[in-house]
Image (cartoon, rainbow, N blue to C red):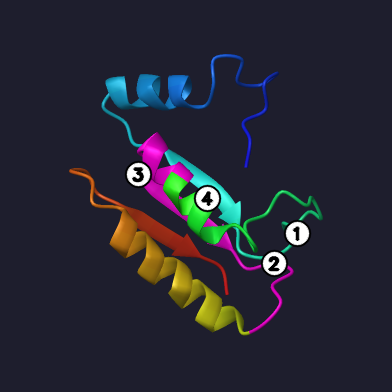
Amino acid sequence: MLADPVKFPLGIEYPINYIHSLGLNYGHYTNAGEKDCGGAVNSSEEWMQQDIDLFASWQIDMLKVDNCNVVGNTTQIIFEWRDMLSFVFLFPFPQHLITCL
């Protein structure tokens, strides 16, 4: 996953840090399938661990994971996301996972 250099010329961390400086939480979206719900191919299917590590480095507060275009058992995949997130996100602020089954 790469931040769009046109939309985020200073990187995605800059707006996230600004949002946190205002006392607000930052939420991010990803998809567990091979394509997102709109058909874009920038999803996390083969990159779950790498993307979770990246989200952790961004110190996100909430993650919405869609289940579009998933190959395999969608419920099992969402449980894998939940388990990986609970293991990786050991930050001193609340973490939330929202899923679409």
Label number found at residue 68: 2
Residue 61 point in image, percent of width and height: 35, 44
Real-space Cα separation, disc 3 to disc 2, in angstroms: 22 Å
Give yes or no for contact between labels 1 and 2 (Cβ–Cβ under 8 Å): yes
- Give the amino acid type for the residue marked by disc 4 in the picture: Asp
Residue 101 point in image, percent of width and height: 57, 75
85 relative position to 37: left or right: left
Of residues 97 and 91, the one nearer the viewer is: 91
Query: What residue is disc 4 on?
Result: 51
Q: Residues within 10 Å of mark 1 (few under 14, many from 20)?
A: some
Label number found at residue 35: 1
Real-space Cα separation, disc 3 to disc 1, in angstroms: 24 Å
Q: Quadrant where the N terminus lies? A: top right
Residue span colored magenta: 54-72
SS for tag 4?
A: helix
Residue 36 point in image, percent of width and height: 72, 56
Q: Residue at x 26, y 27 (%)?
A: 23
Give whichever of discs 3 and 4 has the lower sequence position. Answer: 4
Real-space Cα separation, disc 3 to disc 4, in angstroms: 15 Å
Give yes or no for contact between labels 4 and 1 (Cβ–Cβ under 8 Å): no
- Give the amino acid type for the residue marked by disc 1 in the picture: Lys
96 relative position to 65: left or right: left
SS for tag 3?
A: loop
Q: Nearer the viewer, mark 1 or mark 2?
A: 1
Real-space Cα separation, disc 4 to disc 1, in angstroms: 15 Å
SS for tag 1?
A: loop
- Give the amino acid type for the residue marked by disc 3 in the picture: Asp
